């Protein structure tokens, strides 16, 4: 299959997945007893099993994912509500359902974290989760048992393990009104001992990624690896234009040399490349500028190819970067490499000299794009 046909196929599949992210809560009325046997680790280092599913008044199973925009909207509200729900006798278990390697790079463009177990730990810590956050991404036992298709999703059971509600956590356009939503109203009825008939709501969020989706992620990675990578000459006038030009998107500049800190350069270029693949569809522009001679151009190009960095790549002579050098951070070594992130209005954001920490770069890109 040629590249053009592959891109078309990937695009069609992505469109279908986007359309599938608006669904009704599960129509099938699964009981807690129908969940296959599991022993899954939570971020609190505890192992949770089927024995942990029964609550005094009821049980709430929530499926949340780090990278999902809608899941992130409800994080703080879940922390606020969970104490009240737990004190009313509701057992709460939150599962991360995604097979994380099947998530496409650009699907991470609205999050500072992916869905690995380590990243779950980091998110739980940063958001002060006060409920079990359990990894179900490997075998997806609970996820498949309930046929979960989307995050965030809620499944509410009574004290006998009978499902009474499935669907959204609340209105994602008004998350602050979660207590007026269907989930909380059903929980209040359970806590107050009222009879509740099964009901479900339309849900909106991100499609759960399963192991079978891995082929699509691998195809996209192969397409990325086959992208044309070039490096062109840029004189001082051209470089200055890139810096001064006001745009509707953030610009990231990385200045490096073949003769200084070679190991750092290779690591940095790989870090930049992985982040560029995540954020470029949101409008991020990346410029790399190698300080080298014309006869060293091919050496620079080979390093860029190894990093699979298909950004705007240029080389220039050292005497032509006087304006570019003003992007360098005032702290650290006065040599290459150094980098700088600019807003569309050319205001300085993240910048550092030397080794780039991937997490810091990711967060900087995310915050700047969100504020753009």
Image (cartoon, rainbow, N blue to C red):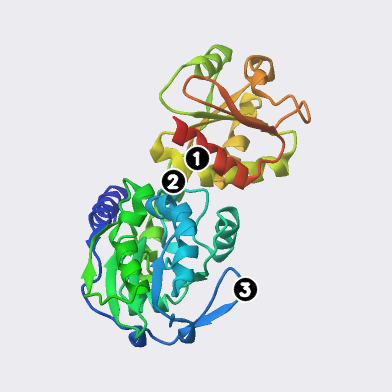
Say which residue label 2 marks: 110
Q: Position of residue 56 (x, y in %)?
A: 43, 81
Say which residue label 1 marks: 366
Residue at image point 44% right, 52% down? 72
Q: Position of residue 293 (x, y in %)?
A: 65, 25
Q: Position of residue 218 (x, y in %)?
A: 41, 60
* Label number found at residue 107: none
Kindly tell me whether residue 205 is visible in this rendering: no
Secondary structure of residue under mark 1: helix
Residue at image point 28% right, 75% down? 194
The crowding category of the residue bearing disc 3, from other C-alpha atoms within 10 Å (few below 14, some 14 to 19, many at least 20), is few
Viewer-proximal residue among 145 and 193: 193
The C terminus appears in which quarter of the rendering?
A: top left
| Left or right side of 181 for 46 | right
| Left or right side of 368 for 236 | right
Q: Are marks 1 and 2 in contact (CB under 8 Å)?
A: yes
Position of residue 126 relative to residue 239, above or below, is: below
């Amino acid at each position: 299959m040629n590249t053009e046909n592959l891109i078309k196929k990937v695009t069609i599949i992505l469109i279908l997945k986007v359309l599938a992210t608006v669904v009704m809560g599960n129509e099938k009325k699964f009981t807690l007893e129908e969940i296959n046997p599991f022993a899954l680790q939570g971020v609190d280092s505890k192992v949770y099993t089927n024995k942990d599913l029964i609550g005094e008044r009821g049980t709430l199973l929530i499926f949340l994912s780090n990278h999902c925009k809608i899941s992130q909207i409800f994080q703080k509200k879940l922390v606020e509500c969970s104490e009240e729900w737990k004190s009313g006798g509701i057992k709460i278990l939150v599962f991360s359902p995604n097979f994380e390697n099947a998530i496409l790079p650009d699907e991470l463009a609205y999050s500072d974290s992916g869905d690995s177990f380590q990243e779950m730990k980091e998110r739980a810590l940063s958001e002060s989760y006060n409920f079990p956050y359990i990894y179900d991404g490997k075998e997806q036992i609970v996820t498949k048992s309930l046929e979960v298709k989307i995050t965030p999703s809620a499944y509410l059971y009574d004290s006998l393990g009978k499902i009474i509600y499935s669907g959204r956590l609340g209105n994602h356009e008004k998350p602050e009104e979660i207590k007026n939503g269907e989930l909380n109203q059903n929980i209040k009825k359970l806590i107050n001992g009222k009879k509740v008939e099964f009901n479900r709501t339309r849900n909106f969020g991100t499609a759960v990624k399963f192991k079978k989706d891995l082929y699509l992620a691998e195809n996209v990675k192969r397409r990325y690896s086959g992208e044309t990578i070039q490096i062109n000459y840029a004189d001082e006038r051209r470089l200055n234009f890139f810096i001064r030009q006001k745009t509707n998107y953030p610009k990231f500049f990385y200045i490096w040399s073949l003769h200084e800190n070679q190991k750092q350069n290779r690591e940095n270029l790989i870090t930049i490349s992985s982040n560029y693949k995540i954020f470029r569809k949101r409008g991020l522009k990346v410029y790399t500028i190698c300080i080298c001679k014309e006869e060293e151009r091919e050496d620079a190009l080979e390093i860029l190819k190894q990093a699979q960095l298909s950004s705007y790549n240029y080389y220039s002579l050292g005497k032509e970067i006087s304006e570019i050098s003003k992007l360098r951070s005032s702290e650290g070594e006065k040599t290459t490499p150094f980098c700088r992130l600019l807003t569309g209005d050319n205001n300085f954001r993240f910048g550092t000299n030397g080794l780039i920490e991937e997490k810091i770069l990711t967060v900087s890109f995310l915050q700047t794009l969100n504020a753009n």
